[in-house]
Amino acid sequence: MTDQRIEEHAVRFKLLSHPVRLQILDILRRNPECVCHLEAVLGKPQPYISQQLRVLREAGVIVDNKEGLNVFYQLADPEIAALLNVALGPNLPERNGAHQSVLSCECPHCS
Amino acid sequence: MTDQRIEEHAVRFKLLSHPVRLQILDILRRNPECVCHLEAVLGKPQPYISQQLRVLREAGVIVDNKEGLNVFYQLADPEIAALLNVALGPNLPERNGAHQSVLSCECPHCS
DNA sequence: CTCCAATATTCAAAGTTCTGCATATAGTGA
DNA sequence: TCACTATATGCAGAACTTTGAATATTGGAG
């Protein structure tokens, strides 16, 4: 295992070592969701959510998908998905199935 | 997934997000090793290694085993082992088998 | 008991990350 | 075009991590 390879893995783990980012990834591994949805579920200010999304996006772990005014993010990294499966438990079909609407989110997918 | 549970997982990932700690864990998942061995392999000063070992020990991820003057550390957390298997690849038998002696290490296991 | 070798602890400076806030951009509909 | 809504960016202070250096502890040999 070269130093450079170890460093890359450490950087990946660092992405997962932040509670808000970890929670975002746990949500996105089930369904693509828009920023306003994450804002509603996590109860954090929107610029703060966007900043964490940027970190994940620039690392290539998630990708964004514009739908009108909304931006839907989804998990795009199978290795991260595998790590989440081991750490947080598998992404079960019953959790995975339907998109859970959230009252406080007004996006097209929730309303 | 409660906030507290997410927080605990984030803390675990943080342990793995440091290159030296990650490398230590990658070595220890193969064999128990003494501090002087890690010092020789990693090429870092001894107090520095001991500090990272303390972080891992206090988190309950490794345990120490005194043999005379030497202290041998080993991985003691199956969940961390599982994460390492997914991230760094499996701990193969051929890597796992014999303890690799290191010239610059003078401990009883190396000489 | 004294010395030596292995490991542990403490502390402080330098660097990084986190978080909140103010503001910018971009897409949509009137 | 203008106003509005959703999202993104930039920046700065606070908090935390990292790293190195000096020093302490512990256990064994003589």
Image: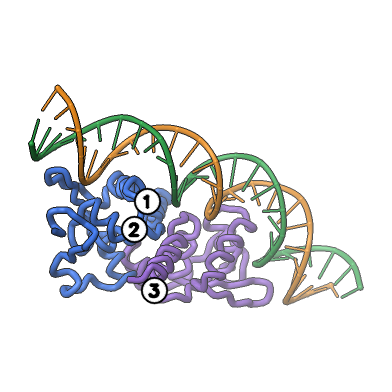
Chain colours: A purple, B blue, C orange, D green
Residue A34 in sight: yes
Quadrant in the picture for the C terminus of chain A: bottom right
Mark 3 falls on what kind of element?
Answer: helix
Which residue is at a point 43% across and 51% down the rendered structure image?
Answer: B3
Quadrant in the picture for the N terminus of chain A: bottom left
Q: Given the image, on which type of amino acid does mark 2 rest? A: Gly
Residue A91 in sight: no
Q: Give left or right: position of B105 versus C28.
A: left
Q: Position of residue C25 (x, y in %)?
A: 76, 70
Q: Give left or right: position of B55 versus B97.
A: right
Q: Chain of mark 1?
A: B
Q: Nearer the viewer, residue A20 or D20?
A: D20
Which residue is at a point 28% across and 58% down the rendered structure image?
Answer: B40
User: Dot 2 corresponds to which residue?
Assistant: B43
**Rendered image: mark on residue A45:** none
Q: Nearer the viewer, residue A31 or B96?
A: B96
Marked residue nearer the N-terminal end (2 or 1): 1
Q: Position of residue A89 (x, y in %)?
A: 32, 64
Q: Given the image, on which type of amino acid does mark 3 rest? A: Glu
Disc nearest the viewer among 3 and 2: 2
Disc nearest the viewer among 2 and 1: 2
Q: Are marks 3 and 2 in contact (CB under 8 Å)?
A: no
Q: Are marks 1 and 3 in contact (CB under 8 Å)?
A: no
Q: Position of residue A10 (x, y in %)?
A: 41, 63
User: Dot 3 corresponds to which residue?
Assistant: A79
Q: Given the image, on which type of amino acid does mark 1 rest? A: Glu
Q: Are marks 2 and 1 in contact (CB under 8 Å)?
A: no
Give me the C-alpha separation between circle 1 and circle 3.
21 Å
Q: Chain of mark 2?
A: B
Which residue is at a point 43% across and 68% down the rendered structure image?
Answer: A8
Label 2 Cα crowd, 10 Å radius (few <14 / some 14-19 / many 20+): few
**Rendered image: mark on residue B8:** 1
